[in-house]
Amino acid sequence: MYQAIVFLPLLGCLIAGFFGRIIGPRPSEIVTTAFLFASMVLSWIAFVRVGFGHVDERILLMTWVQSGDLKADWALRIDTLTAVMLVVVTTVSALVHLYSIGYMEEDPHRPRFFAYLSLFTFAMLALVTADNLAQMYFGWEGVGLASYLLIGFW
């Protein structure tokens, strides 16, 4: 469930980014927004589970670096603060996606815009679920890159 919260926006970004011209602007909007709303619902479920159940979790995605005693994993850290931030990020982002459908209606490059917006959300989720400083740095840089792409969209 926690992996889906983080990676559904990335999947929406990849679909809209790589296949946006093939599937068209409207399906790109629908796919990215639907994935964000699914991520939002899962975030609320995680919030109830972690916040009220007091269950902290660490989900190992992969071992990133291992050299002697040094071991750096790529993992998701889910605690109460993370659960709150997941709810905030996914809820606001889902509402921004929904608003952008009408706001960007006349723009011919909507698939690219929605891909950038989903990339921003993924990077923010990667930032708030980071288990170590290196992961946090990648999330931070991803947010910076996505912000640059969104600001330079027009």
Image (tube, helix red, strand yellow):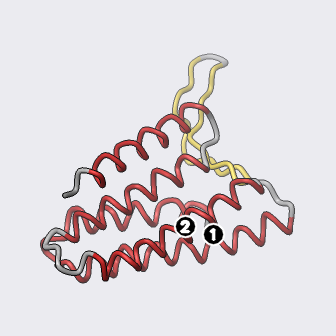
In this rendering, would 32 be left or right of 137?
A: left
* Secondary structure state at the residue bearing disc 1: helix
Question: Which residue is depicted at the point 37% across and 56% down?
Answer: 119
Question: Please, what is the three-letter code of the amino acid marked with disc 2?
Answer: Thr
In this rendering, would 21 be left or right of 87?
A: left
Q: Is residue 123 above or below residue 9?
A: above
Q: CA distance from mark 2 to mark 1?
A: 7 Å
Q: Residue 35, percent across and down?
A: 44, 74
Q: Residue 150, percent across and down?
A: 30, 55
Front residue of 87/27: it is: 87
Mark 2 Cα shell of 10 Å, populated few (<14), some (14-19), many (≥20): many
In this rendering, would 134 be left or right of 78?
A: left
In what quadrant of the picture does the C terminus appear? bottom left
Q: Residue 48, percent across and down?
A: 77, 72
Question: Which residue is depicted at the point 29% across and 52% down?
Answer: 151
In what quadrant of the picture does the N terminus appear? bottom right
* Secondary structure state at the residue bearing disc 2: helix
- Marked residue nearer the N-terminal end (2 or 1): 1
Q: Residue furthest top?
A: 68
Mark 2 = which residue?
A: 90
Q: Is residue 14 above or below residue 63?
A: below
Would you say the residues marked 2 and 1 are in contact, meaning their CB atoms lie under 8 Å apart?
yes
Mark 1 Cα shell of 10 Å, populated few (<14), some (14-19), many (≥20): many
Q: Is residue 126 above or below residue 88?
A: above
Question: Please, what is the three-letter code of the amino acid marked with disc 1?
Answer: Ser
